[in-house]
Amino acid sequence: MTSTPRDPAIAAVLSFFLSGAGAVYNGRIGKGVVIFGATVLGYFLIIPGLILHLWAIYDAWKEAERINRTLAEGPALRSAAPTRSAAPATGAEDLVAKLAQLQRLRAARMLTDGEFAAQKAAVLSRLAARPMHGDPTDLLVRLLPLKEAGVLDDDDVARLKRAAG
């Protein structure tokens, strides 16, 4: 994957003029070549080629958006990852790590929003069922990047504050 933001409009325009070029622009060279080849073959039957070409334009746009979203979320989630220390992991570190993992899976489209919400609720429920040890302020500081990235909403934070005591 590319480490620089991509303009969805450029990706779509490139695919409009040459099917698959938007995928190449997005850093997916193999995908671009396959799309180009399939579109050329599809144009022999006209309608399949047109459908593939339109899909390539749409896919290039969505892929550029996904790249940009992943790049935007990446720094916040990396800073949310627990740091390694000599002390054993606490509930807060486990929680932050699990929620960051779930968000990365959602950003990579490996979890739907519904699956993400269900798994996040399960993680929060497990945490609320056991008492938290340590300073509640430490928990909030660890959760801050997840809150800023939109992984946690105000209700989630309030629930965690109650669980932390």
Image (tube, helix red, strand yellow):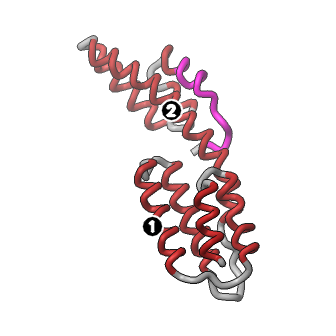
Q: Is residue 163 left or right of residue 45?
A: right
Binning the other alpha carbons within 10 Å of mark 2 as few (below 14), some (14 to 19) or many (20 upward) gives: some
Q: Quadrant of residue 164?
A: bottom right
- Above or below, 55 against 145 in this view is above
Location of the N terminus by quadrant is top right
User: Looking at this view, is 136 or 114 the one in front?
Assistant: 136
* Residue found 57% across the figure and 35% down from its top: 65
Q: Is residue 136 left or right of residue 26?
A: right
Q: Earlier in the sequence, mark 1 or mark 2?
A: 2
Q: Which mark is residue 62?
A: 2
Q: Position of residue 153 (x, y in %)?
A: 61, 54
Q: Is residue 22 left or right of residue 136?
A: left
Q: Position of residue 42 (x, y in %)?
A: 29, 19
Three-letter amino acid code at the position of disc 2 = Lys
Q: Position of residue 79 (x, y in %)?
A: 71, 62
* Residue found 53% across the figure and 22% down from its top: 12
Identify residue for label 1.
Answer: 122
User: Looking at this view, is 55 or 1 the one in front?
Assistant: 55
Q: Position of residue 41 (x, y in %)?
A: 29, 20
Magenta residue span: 2-14
User: Looking at this view, is 80 or 117 the one in front?
Assistant: 117
Q: Which mark is residue 134?
A: none
Looking at the image, the residue that sits furthest to the left is 45
User: Looking at this view, is 78 or 40 the one in front?
Assistant: 78
Q: How many marks?
A: 2
The kind of secondary structure element at disc 1 is: helix
- Above or below, 71 against 145 in this view is above
* Residue found 33% across the figure and 26% down from its top: 38
Q: Is residue 60 magenta?
A: no
Location of the C terminus by quadrant is bottom right
Three-letter amino acid code at the position of disc 1 = Ala
